[in-house]
Amino acid sequence: MVLLSTKTVKTIKPHRCMGCVKTIPPGTRVLREVVVDGNEIWTVYICEICQDIIAEHEIDEFSEGDIIRNYTHEYNARKAHHVKN
Ligand SMILES: [Zn+2]
């Protein structure tokens, strides 16, 4: 898999985050990456939470979707806890 481009964009249509698989609503700032896998081109979207998680844990976002999802649960739990206090 080869990364062609990485860009921060504001979404116009809803997209599914490839990390946490949640729907990203239109008007959200996301990381858009274009990758080539064999002879297919994919465009993937990564929400801000998953960008944080990927950066924090130095995860390879393309092969570790399940790991990102686990961290996302942890992240949300931590955030919920933070809001409560
Ligand atoms: Zn996400």
Image (cartoon, grey):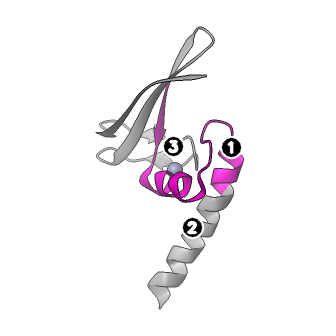
In the picture as drawn, the residue positioned furthest to the top comes out as 39
State the residue at coordinates (61%, 22%): 1
SS state under label 2: helix
Q: Amino acid at mark 3?
A: Cys
* Residue beneath disc 3: 17
Q: Amino acid at mark 2?
A: Tyr
Any atom of ligand 1 within 8 Å of the CB at mark 3?
yes
Image coordinates of residue 13 in percent, x first then y, are 35, 36
In magenta, the rendered stretch is: 43-69
Whichever of callouts 1 and 3 sits on the residue coming sooner in the sequence is 3
In the picture as drawn, the residue positioned furthest to the front comes out as 58
* Residue beneath disc 2: 75
Tell me, yes or no, whether the two marked residues, 1 and 3, touch with CB atoms within 8 Å. no
Image coordinates of residue 58 in percent, x first then y, are 59, 51
**Quadrant assignment, res 57:** bottom right
Whichever of callouts 3 and 2 sits on the residue coming sooner in the sequence is 3
Q: Amino acid at mark 1?
A: Glu
* Residue beneath disc 1: 64
| 3D distance between C-alphas at marks 1 and 3 | 13 Å
Whichever of callouts 1 and 2 sits on the residue coming sooner in the sequence is 1
